[in-house]
Every structure is written in C-alpha cells, then in structure tokens.
Image (spheres, helix red, strand yellow):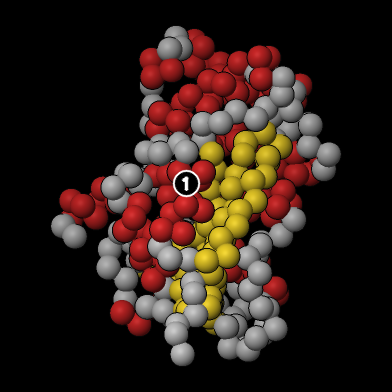
Amino acid sequence: MSPEEKADATGRYFLPRNVEEAERMQNQHEWLKGGANGLVLAPIDLKRENLRVLDAATADGYWMQDARPIFPEDTEFLGFDNAPEGYPPLNSKPPLKIVQQSLVEEFPAEWKDAFDFVHQRFVIPLFKSEEVPLVLSNLTGCVKPGGWIQLVEMDFQTPVSEPLESCKAVQMVHKLTSGVVSDPLAATKLAGRLEENGFVNVESKAVDMIAGSANPNQEMGERGARNMLSVLGFFQSVAKPEMIGLTQEEWADLPKRFAEEMEKYKVALKVYFVWGQKPETAK
C-alpha cells in the first residue's frame, strides 16, 4: 500500500483521535452494551481454556477491558487500530496489548486461523464497497476453525424513530449521515457477507438503540442522546448544509432541533449485531 493509500485509509475515520473522542466512545460502548444486554452475543464456549480474542479497530481498547471478566482468566486479548497512538492509554491491569494495523493492509501471517473470537464494531460503512470484501476476508481469516466472529454496525439510512413525521431533524440527520458514509446500509448486508465467506450458524440481532427521554432506562437514554449529539457535530464538521438542502441558519440550528426531538419523541437508530462460526476443518 502506497503512502497515499495509507493516508486515505486512515482518513476514512473522520472522527478525532483524542481524549474527548475516547470518552465519547466509552459512553457509546456503555449505551450499546445496555441496549443489547451484553457485549458478546455469539454463542462461544466461555468455559474453554486458553482462548484468544482479537478486537479490530479497538481505539483505546475499552471493549477489551470491559470484556475481560466475561472470558476465562487465561484468555489472551489483542487489539489493533490504524492509529492507536492517538488515544490515551487506559489504566488497565494487566496492560492491554494494542498494535498498529490497517484493515485494508495485509494482516500478519501469524494471525491466520489464530483467534477463537474476533470482534469488530462501527467501521465497515466507512469503506468503499469494493474494499469491504478485503476487510471481511482479513477479519474472517483470523478466526480459528470452529471459532466465531461478531460484527456490530449501524444502519444509517432506515428510520425507526416515532412518530417519524414529527421527527424532522432526525430525518435530516439520517440524510446527512447516509451522504457521508460510503455504504449507509452496510449493516444489513453483513450476515450475507459472512455466509459468502463460508461461515455457518450465522445469526443477527437488530436493536433499536433509543436516545433520549423515550428510553425506559434514563441513564441509557442520556448516554444515547449525548453520543448522538457528539456524532452529529463530527458529521457536520466534514459536510456542508447544501448536501441535505438546508440553509446556514437551519444547519446551525440542527443540533438544537435534534436534541429537542430526542427529548420529545422516541428517537432511535437501528444497530445490527451479526455473528457467525468458521466451520471446523475436515478431520
């Protein structure tokens, strides 16, 4: 991969890499965990010894830190990110092992068929459609025969808020995010892509993540609202109002209107949790 291609791959993740973004992602993590009632939905045998877990696009490794108690004590965790140095290290004991690796570069040979569980979250819609097969081939190639992969992605396009006709700002946010990411419906295609890669026992769970006052759990609703307002700000930083037919005044007012709708209506975004198993090799 040329320096230009590497810069392009790194630049797809347009959110910042700093303390504030790490805190936003930690808040988002807790919101997702609450909405899905857990971190690991794939039916991996958590009683086995010497498991190996790979967390893709790990950022600061917060998912690994939180997932540690779920797995046996002797489980080995490894995370990778294309720019891990941008995030402040977590005070985790023992320290988390995080290495630099791009999803569109060749993976280390020692990762092939090496992990019992591979986890990836919120990155595939940023890749061009012609690159997604390479990304998934890299990730699925890391799974041991009999092991599992779990992918978590947001459907940026399909509205699930209610009543939708009243959620004008929410509709604008959907239009904005769908225009920025490469494939707003990438989440809906993951199960089929895993099957194309030869995986079996592929299942999915679609969760309507409620942000704001309609969430029956007040803390989760507040986390969701805080996360979505932050994400909206980042999307606005790389887009222009004319992309979605707004004036400068309407553009500036969009976060306020979005916050009001999260307080007044049932505002939600659909997130897909998809998992599958690599077949055992023939004996």
Q: What residue is at 28 percent from the left and 63 percent from the top?
A: 105
Q: Give how far across and how far down residue 47 sits, in percent.
A: 70, 83
Q: In front here: 277 or 249?
A: 277
* Residue 212 image-quadrant placement: top right
Above/below status of 221 relative to 85: above
Q: Give how far across and how far down residue 171 sits, in percent.
A: 57, 21
Above/below status of 175 relative to 62: above
Q: Give how far across and how far down residue 177 sits, in percent.
A: 47, 31
Q: Give how far across and how far down residue 215 sits, in percent.
A: 78, 37
Q: In front here: 149 or 75?
A: 149
Above/below status of 123 relative to 102: above
Q: Which residue is mark 1?
A: 189
45 sits left or right of 198 in the view = right
Element carrying mark 1: helix
Q: Is residue 141 visible?
A: yes
Q: In front here: 191 or 259?
A: 191
* Residue 103 image-quadrant placement: bottom left
Q: What residue is at 32 percent from the left and 71 percent from the top?
A: 107
Crowding around mark 1 (Cα neighbors within 10 Å: few <14, some 14 to 19, many 20+) is: few
The amino acid pointed to by label 1 is: Lys
* Residue 214 image-quadrant placement: top right
Q: What residue is at 16 percent from the left and 57 percent from the top?
A: 2
